[in-house]
Amino acid sequence: MTSGPLRSDGVGSAAALPITVSNIRKNYGNYRALDDVSLDIHSGEFLTLLGPSGSGKTTLLMVLSGFVRPDSGSVRFADREVVLLPPHKRDIGMVFQNYALFPHMTVAGNLAYPLKLRRVDRAKIAERVEKALDLVQLGGLGARRVDELSGGQRQRVALARAVIFEPRILLMDEPLSALDKNLREQMQLEVRRLHDRLGMTTVYVTHDQREALTMSDRIAVLDKGRIQQIDPPQALYDNPKTHFVADFIGESFSLPVTICDGGATLFGHPLHLPHKITGSAPHFLVLRPEKLTLLPEHPTDAAAGINEIKGQVRQSVFHGDSVMIYVAVRDGHEIALRVPHRGKVTLPQPGDHVSLGYGVEDTIVVPATMPVEGGMR
Amino acid sequence: MLRRPATSTQITHLQRLWLYILCGIVLLYLIVPTLLVIPMSFSGSRFLSFPPETWSLRWYKAYFSSAEWRAATWVSLQAAVCTTIVATITGTLAAYGLHCSRLRITKLLSVLLVLPMIIPVILIAVGVFMLFAPMQLNSSLTGIVLSHSVLAIPLVLITVTAGLRNFDLNQEQVARSLGASRPKAFLTVTLPQIKNSVLSAALLSFVVSLDEVVVALLIAGGDVATIPRRMFLALRDEIDPTIASISTILILLSILLLGLSQFLDRKRSK
Amino acid sequence: MRDAESGFRLNEASLVKQAFAEQLKLLSLSFPALLLVGFIVLAPIAWLSWLSFVDADGFTLANYERLLNPSYGLTLSTTFQLAFLVTAICVLLGYPLAYIAAQLSAGAARIMLLCVLFPFWTSLLVRTYAWLVLLQKRGQINTWLQDWGFTDAPLRLVYNFTGTAIGMVHIMLPFMILPLYAAMKSIDENYMRAAANLGASPTQAFWQIHVPLSLPGLGAGVMVVFVLSLGFYVTPDLLGGGRVMMWSMQIERSLSVYSDWGAASALGVVLLVITLAMLWLFSRLTGVVGAAAGGK
C-alpha cells in the first residue's frame, strides 16, 4: 500500500508547536477525571496518552482540543495560553474515534470544509484536496460519498481532513480502534510515517499498550486521573516506576516482596537488586516471561548476578513461535516463562520441579501504589 | 451556572438563554391552555373565567344529570372498547405476518394498511357514509366500531412492528425446534416479549376511537351519538359550559392513559 | 454425470413449493386487516372517484368544471395558506424545542417530551374547546392583554384566520417535534466537535452540520404537518367560525347542505390527489437528502 516514497512537496510545512500542560484538574461531581496533571510535550514529538478506560486520557485530550473546560490549570501552545480559547479558534487537527466524517458531504467536501472556513480561494482548495488525497493514497476518490468507503479508507480521509489545513498540533482519539487487527497494524506504521513527514506535534490516545509501544516517541501512562510515568517506550518497559505501569505494559507476573533496610526478600530469600529501595511501603517483584531462563537442575555456579526462584510446572502452552511454561511457586502464586520454539529442546513437563533465574538488571521491584511525592507537583 | 458551557463547542448557557426562554414559552403554549380548562370547569357562573369568580360543581351536575350526555358516554366507551379489540387483534396479526413473511408484496401491503392515516379523514368519512347507507350500518354501533377500527389499524401496525424489530425472531425458531407449533411459539414466546408494544397499540386504538369526530359526525346519528359528536355540535352552536366538565374528565383520562403508555415504554426499553 | 446433475436438483420443486406455502400462510395473517381497510376505506373512495366522473348520461367532467368557480379557488388558496403558515410556525417553534430537548439529560428531556406528548394524547375537541374559551372576546387572553395594558379594546382572536392558526399550530406542533427530536438524537456529538475543531464557529457548525444532518427529521415533520393541515376539518370549522373555509369543510357542506354527491366526490378526489402529490413531492425531496445524510 505504501509503495513509493512520500512526496515532500505536499501538505504541512508549518513548524510544530510545543505544548505545556500545567496543574490541570477536572472533576465530574465527586469523580476526579484529571487530578493535577502536568505535562510537557516537545515540539514535533509523537506522544501517546496510554491508560485503561476511565484513566482520564480522553478527558486530557478533550482539554487540549478545547471541548472540555478544566476546573483549573493551564494549557499553553508554545507561549500562548489557550485554556480559555474556544475549540474553533485553536487551529489544531483532530482525528475522532469514529472519524466523524460528515455524512452529508463527499470525501472532497469533507476535506475542503476546513479550507472553506479559512476562506482559502477555490482553485487553491481543489489543489490542496487533491494533494491531501494523494498523501493518504486515496487519489481519485474525492467524489465518493462517505458511506461508500471502507473502514480503512474512512480512517485515511479523517487523517487527511485533520492535517489539510496544516495545523501545527495533531490530536488523535483512539483512531484505529474500529479497524481489524491487520489493518490496524498497517495503519499504525502509516500514521507514524505521516507524522514523521509532516512533523507536527502529535498527541495520540489509546488503551492498547502494543500500539503505544510501536508508535510513540514517549508514552505517558495514566491511571485514575494521574500521570504514572512518562518515558520512551523502552524505558517504560524495562524500568517501570510503579506496579500499575509494570502490570499495564507488556506481560508480567507480580510477587509480593518484603522490604527492609533498602533491600528486599522474596519468600524469605534476599534478592540481588540493581539499586537500593527507599521507603517501606509494600512492593512487588515484577517478572516478565521472556526475561526468565531455565536453570540447570544442579546449578554449577549460583552466580552473584542472578536471582533464582523454584517451582513446579503446571502447564505448557504452545504459541507457535514460543512456548509459555506456567510455573506454580510458593503460596499459590504463579509465574510464567517464555521459551523460544526451536524444536529438539526437551522442555520440562507438567509436574516437574524447576529453577528459574533472572538477571539483577531485570529484577524490577516496584511500589504497590504510586509514591506520594513530597508536596504536589 | 449560567456561565458554564452548555455544549462541547463551549457556548455558555447565558449565551443561549433566549433559546431556553423560547422553549419555556412553547412548552407553556403546549400544556397551559388545556390545563386551564380544569379550574374553569368548577366555575359557578355561565361565563367561564380564570380563576373562577365563584366555585361550584354546577357543570358536573349538568353533565351527570343529562340523559343525552350519559347515553353518549356509554356509546363512546362501548365503541372505544370494541374498536380496541378489533384493531389490536387484526393489526397485531398483520404486523406479525408482514414482518415475518419474506415475500416482496409485504411492502405494498404495509403501505395499503397505513393509508387510512394519510388519506384525509373527511374523505374516509364520506366514503364510509356512502358504503354504510345501503347496509343500514349508519347510526349503528357496528358501523362506528368498523370505521374506527380502520382508523386505528395503522397505529397498531406501526407500534407493533416497532416492537417486533427489537425482537429476535430466532427465538421463535428455537421454540419450534423444541417442539412448539408456529401458533404456539407465537403465543408462548413472541407475544409475551412484544406484550408492551401490543398494549401500547391497544391504548392508542382506545384513544383514537374516543377522540374521533369527523366520521362520527357523518355516521353516528340518533341513538348512537358519541361524546365527540355531541361536543362538536354543541360547540358549533354555542359554547355550553357543560363541555368544560366533560373536557376535564377527558383530560384526566388522557393523563392517565399517557402515564400508562409511558410506563409501558419504560418497561419496553428495559 | 447425469446422476450427479439430477442429484443437485433433488426435491427442489417440492421444497420451493413448501417454502412458498409457508410464506403465504404468514402473509394471510394480514388479510383480516387488509379486508377491513380495503372494504371500508379504499373501495368506497375508489367508488367515489368513479362517481365524480359519471352522471345520468355517462362520462362527464361537469363536476370538475364546477370547481373552476372562483369561490372554490378561494377555498383552495385559504387551505394552502393555512397549511403553509401552520407548517412554518411549527418549524420555527418546534426546531428550537427539539434541539434543546435532544441535548438535555435523559431526565429533563423526558419531562420536556411529556409536555409534548400530553397534547398528543388529549382529545382534539378538548384542546379546540380550550382555545375557543381562551380566545373569545371576553376570554382569558383578552382579559390579560387588557389588564397588562397591551390593548384597550378586546382583540378579535377567534372565529377568524388568526384563531384558526393558533389552534392548529397547537394541534400540529407535536407532529413536528417528535420526528425532529428523533433525528437530532441520532446525530453523533462528534460531528459538531469535528466541525469546531476544523475551525467552524458554533453558528457555522449549527447551519453547516447540524441543520443538514437533522433534515430527515425536519422533512418528516414538515410532510406530516403539511399533509394533515391540508385535510384538517375540526379545528378550522370551530375556530374559524365559518369565516375560514377549508377544502375539507367544502366537502362536508356540499353533502350536508346541498346533498350534492357529484360535487362532494369531485372535491374529495381533488383533495386526495393534492395530498398524494404533496406526499410524493416531500418523499422525493427528503428521500434524496435523507439518503445522503442517513448513512453513517
Image: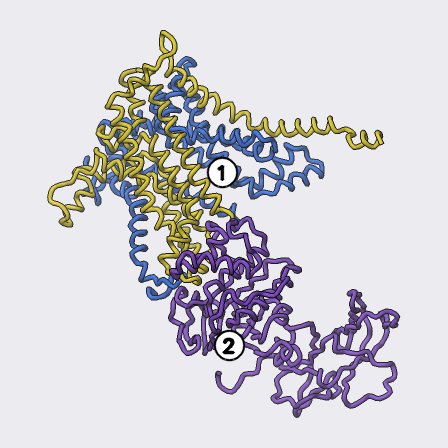
Chain colours: A purple, B blue, C yellow
Relative to residue C276, is residue A270 drawn left or right?
right
Reply above or below: A163 against C44: below
Identify residue for label 1.
B159
Q: Answer with the quarter of the image where residue A22 lies.
A: bottom left
Q: Which residue is mark 2?
A: A41
At numbered mark 1, what does the secondary structure look like: helix, strand or loop?
helix
Chain letter of the residue carrying label 2: A
Q: Position of residue B18 (x, y in %)?
A: 29, 56
Residue B224 seen in the current view: no
Nearer the observer: mark 1 or 2; the answer is 2
Taking the spot 34% from the left edge, 15% from the top edge, the residue there is: C61
Q: Is residue C146 left or right of residue C49?
A: left
Q: Is residue A39 above or below residue C152?
A: below
Q: Position of residue C292 (x, y in %)?
A: 48, 46
Q: Are marks 1 and 2 on the same chain?
A: no
Give x and y (percent) for residue A324. Answer: 78, 70
Task: State left or right for residue A176 relative to residue C216.
Answer: right
> Is A216 in front, or is B186?
A216
Q: Residues within 10 Å of mark 1 (few under 14, many from 20)?
A: many
Read off the chain for label 1. B
Amino acid of disc 1: Thr
**Camera-side residue of A35 and A149:** A149
